[in-house]
Amino acid sequence: MRKIRLSRHVRVSFIKSAILVILLNILFIPPFVKYEPDGDNLFVLYLNGEEVGTVGSLDRVNEIIADARRAVGRDSDSIVYLESDLSYDARRALFAKVDSERTVRDNMARVMRSDAYEVLQSCYTMRIGDITVNLPDSDSVREVLQAALDAYDTKGQYKAELVVDPNRELNALTVSVVTDEEAKEKAGQAPVWNAGIAAVISEAMEAEDETEDDGLSFDDYEYGITGMVFDDNIEIVESYLTEDQLSTVDEAIEEVVSFKEVNTIYEVQDGDTLSEIAMKTQVPMEKIVELNENLEDTNSMIRSGDELVVTTTAPPITVERVERQYIEEYYDAEIQYVDNDEWYTYEQVTLQQPSCGRRNIVADITYENDKEIGREIVKEEVLVEAVPKIVERGTKIPPTYIKPLSGGRLSSGFGGRKAPTKGASTNHKGIDWATPIGTAIYASSGGTVTKAGWGSGYGYVIYIKHPDGRETRYGHLSKVLVSPGQSVKQGQKIALSGNTGRSTGPHLHFEIRINGVAVNPLKYLN
């Protein structure tokens, strides 16, 4: 009986020992993969190209990498962009060690931290046209905008104010301009919106209506700036950038407030010449010619309504302001026009020469930065009346001129040239298009044929007189299809090109003459 009890004791001890061994194996012995005869059972994981562990299944990889992301995010007080390019090598193994999820997660978090792109701070991005600056906070934005105002407001009467734009989903700011007194009164409140320079003028006029009467003398007015606004579409949005992407306030002021050379459009006015435009815009005539392809030289013709590119200096940010000024000035009366329906629009005659007058005025002058764009006279005292210029001008639309053939290669231009053949002129009075013999030639404009036949030097030639007094000539023809006295329409076929007369090869010679003087046809062709 004693022997049997001992055997039972041994069995109990053995079972306890086996359980202990199993628990120790679970706790301290690394896990191994389960053999899969029909597929891969070992996966070596790589994050951003660096090995982070080995697992026996991909089922929980997404959860592990998400845990790693959360761990990195908890460690940072700022916004963190994490690179997480995960890849793996798949293998089949009979017996292999794998890593625990915790080990894989920790390795992933380590790689993410080393590759993290951290935004060091929130900031504000301000865009004005094509210019973008990044500033660390809203106070810096306000300081830059205030510098733009202070460039003109030397008395510090106006302040730039920022407010969150309720109409934008993103955290965006808008800017308004208020008086210094308003800024103090509205401390801690949203600024009152200003609806543009029209509102400034309107407010100034309303204030004038309340205080002004006909008995005011020039000394009774208050002079200086009466209103300011920003005339640009200024965008200010919150963003997150690294410190090296931010500008200092001084750098931003230099970028958006300092004057820079830009191209603008000048519309030609009645009576303008290139020299007068050069004086008005402070741009040399040669520079204007260089900027405008339609101008050949400083003697090129310009017409009222033409648009010319000129350079000017201006800051990227535009400040509009209204200034009330007392001015003693010489002034010109507006030009008076007398329309003549029998004349073409390019014909005009001065009937009365002008004479400037002299006056004292109080004026509300609107400026875009340093450029005057409008003037409202509040009070005027005329000392000497101005005499207006009176001009009689035509209203009839003049004929147009088209190229007299299809195709052709421009082989000789207008003006001075080397004589192409003996006896040919070195002062070319037209232009030549090289073209095969027999090419159709068309009337450049409607008119009356005054010559159609042989002309010395021209070979077979056609002259056409046009209603505006101009004349076109078509030379070196092979065949003439019209007769003297015949009326032709613009685009009507009048001849075939050739190589007759004093010619070095098949081509059309084409002239336009005004008052008998040859001009460059290329300036008149549409």
Image (tube, rainbow, N blue to C red):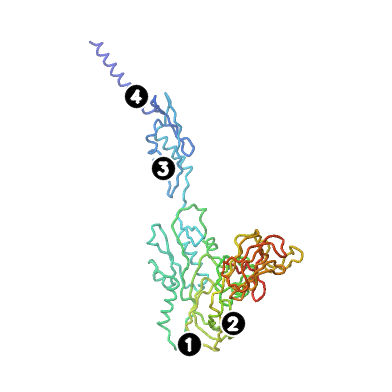
Q: In the structure shown, which secondary structural element does the residue marked by tag 4 occupy?
A: helix
Tag 3: amino acid? Arg
The image shows a total of numbered marks equal to 4
Nearer mark to the viewer, of 1 and 4? 1
Which label's residue is closer to the chain start, 3 or 1?
Answer: 3
Mark on residue 365?
A: none
Q: In the structure shown, which secondary structural element does the residue marked by tag 2 occupy?
A: strand
Nearer mark to the viewer, of 2 and 4? 2
- Is there a contact, CB below 8 Å, between mark 2 and mark 3? no
Horizontal and vertical percent position of residue 29: 39, 26
Mark on residue 69?
A: 3
Q: Which residue is mark 1?
A: 217
Q: Residue at x 42, y 61 (%)?
A: 173
Rendered-image quadrant of the N terminus: top left
| Horizontal arrangement in the rendering, residue 499 relative to residue 39 (left or right) | right
Nearer mark to the viewer, of 4 and 3? 3
Within 10 Å of disc 2 (Cα), the crowding (few <14, some 14-19, many 20+) is few
Rendered-image quadrant of the C terminus: bottom right
Q: Tell me the distance, in whole angstroms, between the alpha carbons under discs 3 and 1.
A: 76 Å
Nearer mark to the viewer, of 3 and 1? 1
Q: Is residue 308 above or below residue 29?
A: below
Tag 2: amino acid? Val
Q: Which residue is mark 4?
A: 22
Tag 1: amino acid? Ser
| Horizontal arrangement in the rendering, residue 12 relative to residue 481 (left or right) | left
Q: In the structure shown, which secondary structural element does the residue marked by tag 1 occupy?
A: loop
Within 10 Å of disc 4 (Cα), the crowding (few <14, some 14-19, many 20+) is few
Q: Quadrant of residue 180?
A: bottom left
Q: Quadrant of residue 350?
A: bottom right
Q: Which residue is mark 2?
A: 349
